[in-house]
């Protein structure tokens, strides 16, 4: 059961908010509990959609902040007066720390940050969670129940580390998509048609990821198992491994994303 039987308000229903909503409905939550708040008022089948918080009525049991982080302060004047001591605030706002949320929403039961990623839309996501100081076990359990249908859950106790972990799992799908695209382009350069190279690259990455997920060995060891001494795979791995080029590239990529996360956190304070 998620936060008893009280109302759930979902503020924003884009990629992440929409994925969460689909997960809730698939898990059997009563749609009557859910109010989606989006300025456009664009309808969503099966749930109530409002352009602004309802002027009267029960305070939300759960307030899920899923709008763009840059829209937070625009939304606070209408939302903050509606929360009460029984409201669990769940934030999926990148780069917005728990103390910054507490300053804007002084009345709340607990604050839990969640960082999903886009595979959450198919139930294969990674859901990072961080509970602000004062959140009890019950609040944490309810927040986890909100996102459990969307993928695996991982708690991060240190909020500073939460931001760094977010750039790995939260941004990671985009980096992997770039790799798939680059692999396809390389296949095309070898003479394959663009369509066929794209199909082969995507199927290869999907199958390899599933194999790695079920293996008892590290991905590094699996790579070595594919590569026979003096063979074609080893020749390619020698290029990847030269001067630890790929390791250094990914370290630079995550460092750049982490810096931006820290800049966003500073702006929200």
Image: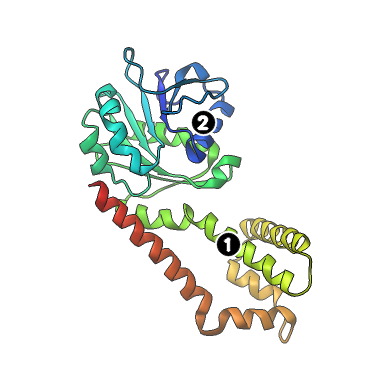
User: Which residue does the numbered mark 2 point to in the structure image?
Assistant: 21
Tell me if mark 1 has few (under 14), some (14-19) or many (20+) residues whose alpha carbon lies within 10 angstroms of its own: few
Mark closest to the chain's N terminus, 1 or 2: 2
Q: Is residue 245 left or right of residue 82?
A: right
The residue sitting at 23% across, 37% down in the picture is 102
SS state under label 1 = helix
Above or below for 231 versus 246 = below
Q: Can you tell which quarter of the image residue 80 is in? A: top left
Of all residues, the one furthest to the top in this rendering is: 56
**x then y, percent, for residue 207:** 70, 58
Taking the spot 49% from the left edge, 16% from the top edge, the residue there is 32
**Secondary element type, mark 2:** helix
Rendered image quadrant of residue 60: top left
Q: Is residue 158 visible?
A: no
**How would you rate the neighbour count of disc 2 (Cα within 10 Å): few for under 14, some for 14-19, many for 20 or more?**
many
Residue 29: percent from left, percent from top: 52, 23
Q: Is residue 162 left or right of residue 224?
A: left
Image location of residue 218, percent across then percent down: 58, 66
- Residues marked 1 and 2 touching at CB (< 8 Å): no
Say which residue label 1 marks. 178
Residue drawn at point x = 31 percent, y = 51 percent: 159
Asked if 60 appears above or below 195 in the picture, the reply is above
Using the image, determine if residue 122 lies above or below residue 142.
Answer: below
Discs 1/2, front = 1
Horizontal and vertical percent for residue 269?
A: 22, 47
Residue 88 appears in the figure: yes
For marks 1 and 2, give the CA distance.
28 Å
- Give 160 or 21, whichever is nearer the viewer: 21
Q: By what rule are the colours in the image chosen?
A: rainbow
């Amino acid at each position: 059961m998620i936060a008893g039987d009280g109302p759930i308000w979902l503020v924003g229903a884009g990629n992440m908010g929409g994925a969460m909503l689909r997960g809730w409905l698939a898990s059997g939550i009563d749609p009557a509990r859910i109010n989606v708040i989006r300025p456009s008022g664009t309808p969503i089948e099966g749930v109530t959609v409002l352009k602004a918080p309802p002027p009267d009525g029960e305070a939300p049991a759960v307030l899920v902040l899923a709008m763009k982080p840059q829209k937070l302060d625009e939304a606070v004047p209408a939302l903050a007066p509606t929360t009460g001591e029984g409201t669990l605030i769940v934030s999926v706002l990148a780069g917005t720390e728990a103390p910054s949320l507490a300053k804007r929403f002084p009345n709340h039961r607990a604050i839990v940050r969640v960082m999903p990623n886009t595979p959450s839309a198919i139930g294969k996501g990674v859901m990072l969670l961080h509970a602000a100081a004062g959140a009890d076990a019950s609040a944490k359990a309810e927040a986890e129940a909100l996102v459990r249908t969307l993928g695996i859950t991982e708690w991060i106790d240190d909020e500073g580390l939460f931001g760094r972990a977010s750039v790995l799992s939260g941004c990671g799908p985009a980096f992997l998509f770039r790799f798939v695209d680059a692999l396809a382009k390389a296949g095309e350069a070898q003479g394959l048609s663009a369509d066929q190279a794209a199909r082969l690259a995507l199927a290869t990455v999907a199958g390899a990821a599933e194999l790695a997920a079920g293996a008892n060995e590290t991905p590094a060891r699996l790579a070595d198992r594919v590569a026979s001494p003096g063979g074609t795979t080893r020749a390619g791995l020698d290029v990847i491994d030269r001067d630890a080029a790929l390791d250094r590239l990914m370290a630079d990529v995550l460092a750049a994303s982490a810096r931006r996360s820290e800049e966003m956190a500073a702006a929200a304070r």
